[in-house]
Amino acid sequence: EAAAQAVGQMGPDALPAIRGLLDHPDKYVRRHGVWALGKMGPAAQPALPDLCRALKDADPRTASGAAQTLGNMG
């Protein structure tokens, strides 16, 4: 969790690493990846396709987190 938070605060340079978290087999890693993208705000726009894909995640918290992040992005 702390690592995802720190990476999310790094800004656009961290975007490729965070996007990779959304494909991780561990649901907790995916959740924190979505959360980190949410912390990036508008800078996370390039991850829009990844977040849309995360809406269908098998983990309901990852999916709902993706929905919240997308809503916050506008």
Image: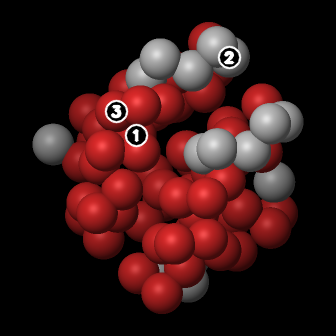
Q: Which residue is nearer to you in this view: 5 or 59?
A: 59
Residue 1 locus on image (x, y percent): 81, 54
What residue is shown with label 3? 52
Cα separation between marks 2 and 1: 13 Å
Visual colour scheme: secondary structure
Percent x, y of residue 65: 52, 30
User: Could you give the CA–CA distance between mark 2 and mark 3, rounded to whole angstroms?
Assistant: 14 Å
At horizontal 36% and vertical 56% (from top left) the residue drawn is 47
Mark-to-mark CA distance, 1 and 3: 4 Å
Is 66 above or below relative to 11? Answer: above
- Up the image or down, 25 lies above or below 14; here it is above
SS state under label 2: loop
In the picture provided, is 44 more to the left or to the right than 8?
A: left
| Residue 51 numbered mark, or none | 1
Q: Say what amino acid the circle numbered 1 marks.
A: Leu
Numbered marks: total: 3
Q: Residue 45 at what x, y percent from top left?
A: 25, 60
